[in-house]
Amino acid sequence: MSKKTNTILFVLGGTIFNIIVTIISFILLCAFCIAFVFPRLSSDSQIQGWLMAGIFIASIIISFLVYRLAVKIIMKKVNMDKYFDPIFGSRRGQGPKQ
């Protein structure tokens, strides 16, 4: 496979991984809140809505942190320059390809 194909597959796989981690963290945080937090709140409380919004934002942050950790691990094990093309052009200091 070419470097461009590897790059496209890496970005696609990373996106799918990020979405899956976001969904899993959202479900786990919702289950925690339903089990431990919501029973202590009154049923007509507006806090539940704000809490769900906070859970959604927290799940996005968690998925971002997990994705960064996974990419760092992959970068230690794989020579990125050997297998992947730069997405936004050449790296600094290397100049344009001739």
Image: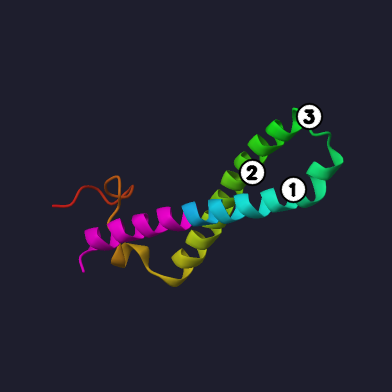
Q: Residue at x 66, y 55 (%)?
A: 28
**In the image, 1: left or right of 55?**
left
Q: Secondary structure at mark 3?
A: loop
Query: Looking at the rendered structure, which numbered label has been put on residue 44?
Result: none
Please name which of the two marks, 2 or 1, marks the residue nearer to the observer.
1
Q: Are marks 2 and 1 in contact (CB under 8 Å)?
A: no
Residue 96: % across, % down: 20, 47
The type of residue carrying mark 1 is Ile
Q: Residue at x 27, y 46 (%)?
A: 89
**In the image, 89: left or right of 10?**
left
Query: Looking at the rendered structure, which numbered label has been put on residue 58?
Result: 2
Residue 55: % across, % down: 66, 42
Which quarter of the picture shows residue 53?
A: top right
* Residue at the disc numbered 1: 34
Q: Residue furthest right?
A: 40
**Which mark is first along the chain, 2 or 3?**
3
**Which mark is first along the chain, 1 or 3?**
1
Q: Residue at x 40, y 70 (%)?
A: 78
